[in-house]
Image (cartoon, grey):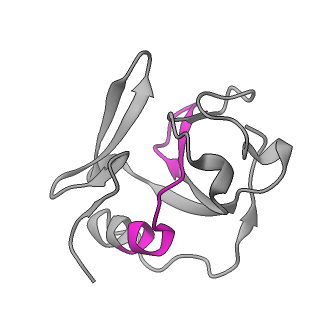
């Protein structure tokens, strides 16, 4: 396992998670690992899961960063920050991202069962 993850859109650095192109027009959301309360892996398939949504949301509880490659991806993650709105990210390498983020944020092992994604 590597201790960092960077696919150009999502970065798990040494001290925080960075979600690029999160804010309009291209601002980065920076989240210290201590603020991350949970991580849920979700399936990205079908219209209601946000597979074709490049940026934003149709559900005010979630926000998806700009990801033009999202239609080709099958997995995403809801990052629980204990706030009203939770970011949804779709990393290029979901297993590597999950491993690094869980390790850095001290979240423990994830749920092996994949959950159906929320409407975004």
Residue 87 in picture, x, y percent from top left: 52, 40
In magenta segment, residue 82? yes
Give the answer, above or below, for where 13 lies relative to 106.
Answer: above
Q: Residue at x 32, y 30 (%)?
A: 28
Looking at the image, residue 72 sits to the left or right of residue 117; the answer is left
Tally the marks.
Answer: 0
Locate the C terminus and report the quarter of the image it occupies. Answer: top right
Q: Is residue 106 or residue 23 the one in the foreground? A: 23
- Residue 93: quadrant of the picture: bottom left
Q: Is residue 115 above or below residue 36?
A: below
Residue extending farthest left: 14
> Which residue is at the front of the view, 34 or 77?
77
Q: Is residue 36 left or right of residue 44?
A: left
> Outermost residue toward the right?
47
Numbered range of the magenta stretch: 79-99
Percent coordinates x, y for residue 37 in the rendering: 44, 54
Residue 107 in picture, x, y percent from top left: 40, 69
* Residue beneath the point at 68% across and 26% down: 60
83 vs 110: above or below: above
- Residue drawn at (39%, 75%) of the image: 99
Observer-nearest residue: 8 or 11?
8
Q: Quadrant of the N terminus?
A: bottom left
Tell me where residue 54 appears, x and y as whole percent.
61, 34
Residue in the picture at 47% in, 80% down:
109
Q: Is residue 96 magenta?
A: yes
Direction top: furthest residue? 25
Q: Is residue 106 above or below residue 78?
A: below
């Amino acid at each position: 396992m590597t201790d960092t993850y960077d696919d150009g859109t999502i970065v798990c650095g040494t001290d925080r998670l960075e979600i690029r192109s999160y804010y309009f027009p291209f601002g980065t959301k920076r989240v210290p690992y201590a603020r991350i309360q949970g991580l849920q892996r979700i399936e990205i398939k079908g219209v209601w899961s946000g597979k074709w949504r490049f940026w934003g949301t149709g559900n005010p509880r979630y926000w998806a960063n700009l990801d033009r490659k999202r239609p080709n991806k099958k997995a995403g993650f809801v990052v629980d920050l204990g706030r009203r709105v939770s970011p949804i990210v779709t990393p290029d390498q979901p297993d590597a991202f999950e491993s690094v983020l869980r390790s850095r944020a001290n979240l423990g092992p994830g749920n092996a069962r994949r959950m159906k994604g929320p409407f975004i």
